[in-house]
DNA sequence: TAGCGTAGAGAACCGTGGTTCTCTCCGTCA
DNA sequence: TGACGGAGAGAACCACGGTTCTCTACGCTA
């Protein structure tokens, strides 16, 4: 079975993403990625110059997919206020997925943020995009910027807590708080 | 200079805590701990059976100190409502400390939570204690348990975000959200 | 003062993991 | 059909880090 470059890249990224997320970055060896993906070490190093580059590629693709899934869900909601709250409903769905282990960027930042500028930068970029998306939906619902920032903090707290406690409940608590914070007028 | 067992333990824990927090656990070698603490490798391994045990001891001592510092600050506040909000004022002070890099347990959990049951358990215990403390202060201010949980999520979100963005602002945003969430009647 | 035990410095040992290299196979093309 | 080139399997290489061991110095005690 001969894989095209794109097929090999996909398989490598799939395997690496699953392994890094489940075990943490440093706990996964390149040989683990090879074993799960079926892509030989030689080809892995042809696709990516090294483990660092693979980590970056994984985080980059995950960022796109994560935000696409979120926006696809929110776009199904009706009025602006419901769309803001839908963020937290989607968090509940995400937290309930088997193997959920918190936010991949928060985990990666805790592990490598201090030693890898690339990981730190990707984390900041991802979180900034998420915050900007919340701000956009929040503004559409007539909310001031301060509220958007508060909603973002609730979402972050829910992700972290759901990961540590391995439970969906924080999403519901955060949703209730969000509903209470939204200005009525 | 001959150090007593307790003196050597303190020096080892001080050095290990600073290094682990600043760089992450796996990025710090036992020889780094030896270099910073001045405690020889031989003695380090006499005090703690291995790196894992040292990590546990560091997190354990930090848990006690962290909660002591928080409660000491909150205890200076007056009425129950002010005491609840004082939690977020203290977070602002903490975030502003030089070298602040987020919550040590969240970072450790992201790095080793999946592979080290001890780290995972210590993280859960620490967060449970923090949540219980907030619940206690919150209840004293006449707030229902749901609000306490929401305040906890705000604090967690603020810690994570302050760590990633390297700014104090999340503490202020979380404080404003907390003030808005507290029931008035 | 001689011997003992402890402690430090630092080398040594050993497994792990990132990266590279070798060998072989197989499909392609002249 | 035979040479070539890319790809996989897996060994090899090499650095790093956790852990242990050796050697030496020094203080205490009989």
Image (spheres, coloured by chain):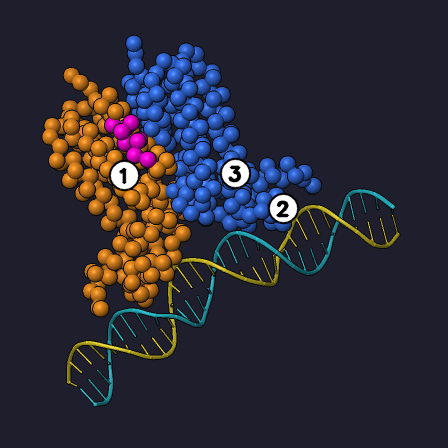
Chain colours: A blue, B orange, C cyan, D yellow
Asked if residue B75 lies left or right of residue B44, the reply is left
Q: Residue B77 in the image: x percent, y percent?
A: 13, 32
Find residue A58 and name its label.
3
Name the chain under label 2: A
In this picture, which residue range is highlighted in magenta? B167-175
Per the image, label 3 sits on a secondary structure element best described as helix
Q: Separation of disc 1 and disc 2 at Cα?
A: 44 Å
Please tell me how crowded label 2 is: few (under 14), some (14-19), or many (20+) other residues with Cα within 10 Å.
Answer: few
Per the image, label 1 sits on a secondary structure element best described as loop
Q: Nearer the viewer, residue B117 or A9?
A: A9
Q: Residue at x 25, y 24 (%)?
A: B176
Q: Nearer the viewer, residue B103 or B135?
A: B103
In the rendered image, residue B5 lying in the magenta stretch gets the answer no
Q: Do the residues under discs 1 and 2 have CB atoms within 8 angstroms?
A: no
Q: Nearer the viewer, mark 1 or mark 2?
A: 1
Is residue A76 in view from this perspective?
yes
Q: Residue A41 in the image: x percent, y percent?
A: 60, 49
Q: Nearer the viewer, residue B79 or A173?
A: B79
Q: Is residue A40 above or below residue B157?
A: below
Is residue B149 in view from this perspective?
no
Give the position of the N terminus of chain A as an image quadrant. top right
Q: Residue at x 22, y 33 (%)?
A: B89
Q: Which residue is mark 1?
A: B96
Q: Which residue is mark 2?
A: A46
Q: Residue at x 12, y 35 (%)?
A: B76
């Amino acid at each position: 079975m001969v894989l095209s470059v794109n097929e090999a890249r996909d398989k490598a990224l799939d395997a690496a993403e699953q392994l890094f997320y489940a075990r943490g970055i440093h706990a996964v060896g390149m040989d683990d990625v090879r074993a799960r993906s079926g892509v030989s070490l030689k080809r892995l190093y042809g696709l990516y110059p090294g483990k660092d580059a693979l980590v970056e590629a994984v985080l980059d693709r995950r960022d796109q997919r994560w935000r696409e899934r979120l926006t696809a869900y929110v776009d199904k909601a009706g009025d602006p206020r419901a769309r803001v709250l839908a963020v937290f409903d989607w968090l509940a769905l995400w937290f309930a997925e088997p193997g959920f282990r918190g936010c991949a960027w928060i985990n990666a930042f805790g592990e490598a943020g201090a030693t890898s500028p690339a990981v730190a930068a990707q984390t900041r970029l991802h979180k900034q995009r998420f915050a900007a998306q919340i701000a956009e939906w929040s503004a559409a619902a007539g909310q001031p910027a301060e509220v958007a920032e508060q909603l973002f903090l609730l979402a972050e707290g829910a992700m972290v807590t759901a990961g540590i406690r391995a439970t969906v409940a924080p999403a519901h608590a955060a949703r209730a708080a969000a509903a209470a914070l939204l200005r009525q007028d």
